[in-house]
């Protein structure tokens, strides 16, 4: 059982470091179960007659994601893994030191001055989002303070969060719970 700070909503599940969203694919998959199957619908014979659909479940948490829309099992597996990483990034929290957190090499490499360059579809996005959310939650949803520690502007950090609707909703819920105004969309 991990410690849950009183200001951390039940919406989040606390886990031990490292954050699962930041793990290499092979390491993350060691903690997952994968099911392959088929689904009906548009896409032609390959989709209807071959096992191309993929469902991945993160066994320790029970969170799952699927990829069923492509004709290729490999593409669906990649899509399911991407969706699982984003879900883990939003729903799982790792307790970090609120004043002196360890900033990852990935975060440093993606930062350009006080800007953060990352597309929400990029493979790095879930790990960056998880790292940012861990710090924001540990700082009681102080976006400006977290941005200063991460070395980016508040607007850059807000933009990173806004790219994911569930993350944006979770941060605003947390801000309201601790008496702060919600972020504007």
Image (cartoon, rainbow, N blue to C red):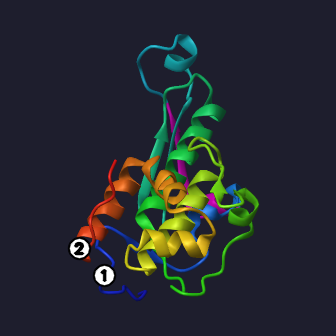
Front residue of 10/59: it is: 10
Would residue 129 be found to the left or right of residue 26 on screen? left
Percent across and percent down for residue 113 are 71, 60
Residue at (76%, 61%) from the top-left corner?
A: 109
Which image quarter is the N terminus in? bottom left
Would residue 124 be found to the left or right of residue 43 on screen? right
Residue marked by disc 2: 177
Percent across and percent down for residue 183 are 33, 58
Residue at (53%, 83%) from the top-left corner?
A: 96
Front residue of 184/163: it is: 184
Q: Start and end of the magenta stretch?
A: 27-37
Front residue of 153/178: it is: 153
Above-or-below relation of 50 to 76: above
Front residue of 46/70: it is: 70
Question: How would you rate the neighbour count of disc 1 (Cα within 10 Å): few for under 14, some for 14-19, many for 20 or more?
Answer: some
Above-or-below relation of 50 to 25: above
Residue marked by disc 1: 7
């Amino acid at each position: 059982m991990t410690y849950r700070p009183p200001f951390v909503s039940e919406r989040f599940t606390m886990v031990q470091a490292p954050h699962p969203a930041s793990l290499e694919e092979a390491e993350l998959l060691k903690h997952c179960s994968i099911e392959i199957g088929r689904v009906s619908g548009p896409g032609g014979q390959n989709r209807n007659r071959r096992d191309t659909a993929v469902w991945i479940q993160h066994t320790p948490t029970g969170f799952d994601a699927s990829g069923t829309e492509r004709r290729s099992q490999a593409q669906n597996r990649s899509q399911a893994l991407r969706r699982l990483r984003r879900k883990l990034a939003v729903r799982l929290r790792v307790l970090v030191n609120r004043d002196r957190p360890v900033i990852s090499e990935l975060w440093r490499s993606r930062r350009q001055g006080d800007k953060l360059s990352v597309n929400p579809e990029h493979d790095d996005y879930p790990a960056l989002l998880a790292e940012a959310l861990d710090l924001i939650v540990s700082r009681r949803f102080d976006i400006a303070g977290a941005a200063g520690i991460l070395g980016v502007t508040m607007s850059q950090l807000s933009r990173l969060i806004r790219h994911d609707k569930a993350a944006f909703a979770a941060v605003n819920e947390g801000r309201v719970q601790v008496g702060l105004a919600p972020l504007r969309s």
